[in-house]
Image (cartoon, grey):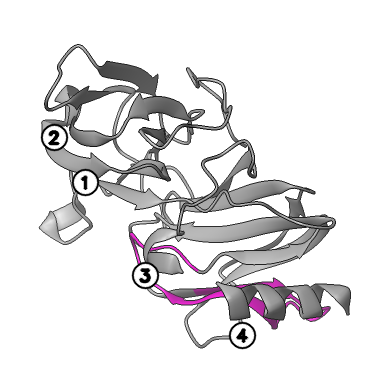
Amino acid sequence: MTFRRDVLKGIGSGAAVIAMGGVGVASADDGEAKIRVAHASPDAPEVEVTLTNVDNEDISETVTVEFTDVTGYLEVPTGDYDVEIPAAGFSTTVTLDADDYTAAAIGELSPEDGDGEEFTVDVFEDKLGRLFGDDGRVRIYHASPDAGEVDVAVADDNDEPDIFLAEGLTFGNAGPNVEVGAGTYPVAVYPAGSSEPVFGPADVEVKDGEVLTAFAEGELEPEGDEPGFEPVLAYEEAAPFGNGNGGGGRGE
């Protein structure tokens, strides 16, 4: 099976997007970083996210996002940045080198009974390096507050896991970057170690020359107006359009 060969190669070497406010993705100089914003907090309203350079407050970018939005990449000088979301009462400081990043708003503003995942912004590196042949690159990011530890895999004809894209993935973490042939594959989510899917299989398209981050968002067991579980697929062209030296962060 071609997909099996390509997935194993990718693991050995290394998961509906709305483009908003993104700056063009021409190659960056050594002194520039690229960063996008993903809103993956199921109970947070539409929010403004502002990135302000610590040493030069004139260098500032603000984007407005609502749940499931993923912006295009913003191009900014490297350095330390304050990340602020006033509506959520959140602020932190991050260092951006000459790499490609995602800033993901995850968790819940009001965790149920104080026992859920608290709201935060997770900033991690993307891997937009060059792709060869007819391959795409896939990575899974776990942003579902109540999903627990999961495996994500291409399913076989019996809906059981065949090829794993991520194993033992926990909230706020990314799986490995996996390079696969372009095509459409049945992907399912399983409780870690199980062969019974809790979501899917659902068709996921891998695009030639593009990097796909699949954000697992929403609640597996929604209550009231809580949004249900869904994959949010964000595509970006690989280098030379990105910086090309992003390391993939904690999932690689």
- Disc 2 residue type? Phe
Mark 4 closeness class: few <14, some 14–19, many ≥20 residues within 10 Å:
some
Q: Is residue 181 left or right of residue 84?
A: right
Which is closer to the viewer, label 4 or label 2?
Answer: 2
Front residue of 238/162: it is 238
Please report contact status of discs 2 and 3: CB closer than 8 Å, yes or no: no
Give the distance between the C-alpha atoms of the residues marked 2 and 1, in whole angstroms: 7 Å
Point out the residue furthest to the right here.
1
The x and y percentages for residue 109 are 20, 41
Amino acid type of disc 4? Ser
Please give the name of the residue rendered at 40% of the width and 56% of the height, measured from the top-left corner.
Answer: 144
Left or right placement of residue 182 versus residue 14 in this view: right
Q: Which residue shows up at 23% across the image and 57% down it?
A: 117
Please identify, in this view, whether the residue under mark 3 or under mark 4 is nearer the observer: 3
* Segment colored magenta: 151-175
Q: Quadrant of the N terminus?
A: bottom right
Q: Which mark is residue 170?
A: 3
Tell me which label, 2 or 3, sits earlier in the chain.
2
Residue 101 - label: none
Per the image, the residue denoted by label 4 is 195
How many discs mark residues in the rendered view? Answer: 4
Q: Do tag 3 and tag 4 residues touch (Cβ < 8 Å)?
A: no
Are dots 2 and 1 in contact, CB under 8 Å?
A: yes
Q: Quadrant of residue 90?
A: top left
